[in-house]
Image (cartoon, rainbow, N blue to C red):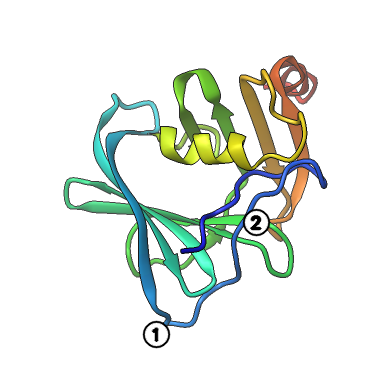
Amino acid sequence: MKRSVVLLLGSALGLALAASSPARAETQLIYSLDTTCTIGRGQPQPCQVEALEVGDATEYRHRLGARTISYRILEDPYVRIEGRRASGDPWSSVRNAWINFSANELCFNDRAFCVVNPTFLADVKADAEGPALEDRQTVGLAFGPSGRVDIACFDDGCRRLLEAIGR
């Protein structure tokens, strides 16, 4: 079974997985996790995460009641993350992603969606090359219009970056 390698930062940190999959690609369950998810400024609510290999991509499906919000990690032709709000919706590039390791939380698009996923984040730390994530609590990524990583930050650098751009 191919495990996903996660989050990137130049060559020190590799955000894994593969390219977009054909519609009939084989799907294989990597893991399932009962946890909490938050939509926008709402309260955390129970959700189930399924991590799946779908063709050459790794897809994370978040089920909140009858709703499913999905994100996938691709690597070809460059590392990127795409999301969709419901099954059947088109995939679109994520604008940004933030990890809070102490809370085991991963958020997308200015906290429009957050998930507590200790399994995924343990993989991120385990798969990081060298000391890139050692003792880090926060990692942030901003993606350009094509989905390619434009900016990466760590810990206090993320706070300073947000201050610099006036958020």
Distance between the Cα atoms at labels 2 and 1?
22 Å
Q: Nearer the viewer, residue 42 or 124?
A: 124
Secondary structure type for disc 1? loop
Query: Furthest-left residue in view?
Result: 65
The reply to whether the C-beta atoms of the residues labelled 2 and 1 are less than 8 Å apart is no
Place of residue 105 in the rendered image (x, y in percent of width and height, measured from the top left): 46, 29
Going from N to C along the chain, the mark reached first, 2 or 1, is: 1
Q: Quadrant of the C terminus?
A: top right
Count residues near mark 2 (Cα–Cα under 10 Å), then give few for <14, some for 14-19, many for 20+.
Answer: many
Q: Which mark is residue 24?
A: 1
- Give how far across and how far down residue 91 sits, in percent: 49, 64
Q: Which residue is mark 2?
A: 80
* 150 sits left or right of 86 in the view: right
Residue at image location 24% in from the left, 52% down from the top: 67
Residue at 66% over, 63% down? 75
Amino acid carrying mark 2 in the image? Arg
Q: Considering only vertical position in the picture, is 54 above or below 37?
A: below
